[in-house]
Amino acid sequence: MTALLRAAALVLGTGYVLAFFSESVFWSVWRAEDALAGRALTWLLYSLFGYLTLAVIRHFRLRDWQELLLAGAFFGWVCEGVYAMTVFGDPSMPFPLTIVWTALAWHAPLSLLIGWYALGLALRDADLRAVSLLSLGIGLFWGIWALGWLAEAPPVAVPPLDFLLHASATTAGLAVAHLAIAAGAPDRFAPSRLGVGLAGLVVVAFFTVVTVPAVPMAILVLPPLIGLLWLMARRIRARRREGSLLAQFATPIQVRNLAALALIPITASAVYGPASFALPPLGFVHPLFAALTSLVGVALFARSLRAALRVRA
């Protein structure tokens, strides 16, 4: 029972962190169509992604941030390919650019690498500066990105106080999620074949029954992408006997560092509030950010592939 509770804390905590950066920060505000039940279902769906991503990290013995991006690409392509289906084209962006946006440009570097890994390590750092600087950066990014929604048709806008309340509530959940991850002992995570098999079956079944009939080209695009990741990750695993970067989470979280997470909603609101009144709609924000993060995402992914090819026994 203890092991089951520990695994549940780890998976649900990871799922919340991924959902926070992939959904709460991306959409930025509590929209009119949002509902608590919908948010809860989204959290559970991201927990499924999180479980499989953790299993990839553990099974293939990924040890550093470059190798973690392979797991990030897996997470992003499953999320955006199997369920959202935006990998195969979107009204706002044509295929094949959608292979990169948002899987490699957002989910892999922001949600997994920064939100789950870097922030998780910063919360364990004895020096408060690491988590403080990271929180300031996340808050600044969030505030500027949120301004881009004001230029949409129709605009996605909320009063500054509502923005602050939403950002504060979801960030409080982020703190609890990282505590849950710590309670789940990531360094001792050992997914069962049955668990991975059932989770994988859910993904494959959805892809076969829903995704492919809706977007037939999916069968020609997604399996080769996942196959590339499998080949690179398998190369890493074949050259190592044991270990993964999950061992880096054995150190307990410094409780005082959790207070620094308040800089995320404070900074984001300090940007969004005044700018939403003083500036006209900034229509260039989303295209500019999408272009920049896509370029960065491709460069980081290429570097992770290169690192996998250079791994030695």
Image: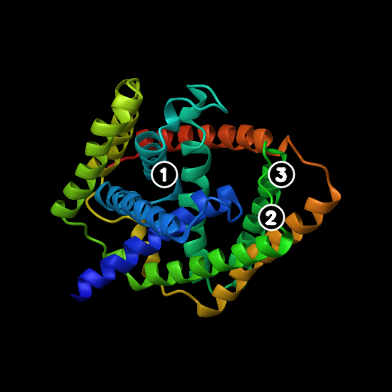
- Secondary structure of the residue carrying numbered label 3: helix
Above or below for 257 versus 239:
below
Distance between mark 3 and mark 2 Cα atoms: 9 Å
Distance between mark 3 and mark 1 Cα atoms: 29 Å
Going by the image, does 266 lie left or right of 7?
right
Image colouring: rainbow
Which of the 4 image quadrants contains residue 242? bottom left
- Figure label count: 3
> Residue most toward the front?
32
Tell whether label 2 touches label 1 (CB within 8 Å). Answer: no
> What's the residue at 66%, 67% (across, down)?
263
Disc 2 marks a residue whose amino acid type is: Val
> What's the residue at 21%, 57% (across, down)?
191
Report the residue marked by disc 1: 72
- Secondary structure of the residue carrying numbered label 1: helix
Crowd tier of the residue under label 2, counting other residues whose Cα lies within 10 Å: few below 14, some 14–19, many 20 or above: some
Q: Is residue 300 visible?
A: no
> What's the residue at 29%, 41% (across, down)?
236
Report the residue marked by disc 3: 150
Q: Which mark is residue 158?
A: 2
Above or below for 259 versus 271:
below
Q: Is residue 141 visible?
A: yes
| Viewer-side residue, 228 vs 36 | 36
| Rendering coords of residue 106 (x, y %) | 52, 42
> Residue most toward the bottom?
256
